[in-house]
Image (cartoon, helix red, strand yellow):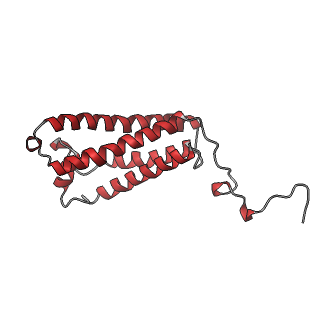
Amino acid sequence: MATTGRVTSIGLTALALLHTIWLVAPWPMSTWEAWGSALFTEPELRATPSVIVTLVSAVGAYVVAARAGLVRQIGPSGVYHIGTWLLAAVLLARGVEGMTEARLLAEADHATLNISPDNFSFYLLLYLPSFLLLGVLSLVVAASGPAKPPPRNTPGGRRAGGHRRLRGRTR
């Protein structure tokens, strides 16, 4: 579960960083309109990304890492258990909703919907699968039993100095 948790946390952190960039710039597009039409089909959604999405991705990365035992949990473990399930549900719902929408878009005329075929490919082949993949990985972490947290003595669980403790003896 540690590897799955690590990969999921890294993916969510990358998603949070990408959304942080998108809070200030429409990268890799040249305008916000081009950015919005690449990711959304409804004109009312074609705006700068939400701070909420950025925060959910960042907090989700920590919650998954804590549930997987990669970092210490602060507070009751039930919060991390439920939080990971909720995160998985939200990511999977977004991916499934987008794929359903994409199926309808594939049957419709792109010109009518103001979305170019290139942007549609980006949406269908990169954007939506990332939500589905992160959702499935979060589901695996959520369904796994609680992980043993790292020891408190040092980061990563290693003893300071890298030597064994001597029992009953002094130097």
- Is residue 23 visible in the rendered image? The answer is no
Is residue 69 shown left or right of residue 12? right
Asked which quadrant contains residue 113, the reply is top left
Q: Position of residue 60 (x, y in %)?
A: 45, 45
Is residue 133 shown left or right of residue 109? right
Seen at 8% across and 41% down, the residue is 112
- Is residue 147 visible in the rendered image? The answer is yes
Asked which quadrant contains residue 73, the reply is top right
Seen at 18% across and 51% down, the residue is 118
Q: Where is residue 34 in the image (x, y as percent from the top left)?
A: 17, 54
Q: Which residue lies furthest to the left in this view?
A: 112
* Placement of 137 over or under 119, stated as above or below: above
Q: Which of 127 and 66 is in front in this view?
A: 127
Is residue 66 shown left or right of residue 156? left
Seen at 33% across and 53% down, the residue is 19
Which quarter of the image is occupied by the C terminus? bottom right
Q: Where is residue 134 in the image (x, y as percent from the top left)?
A: 41, 43
Is residue 96 shown left or right of residue 147? left
Seen at 91% across and 59% down, the residue is 169
Asked which quadrant contains residue 1, the reply is top right
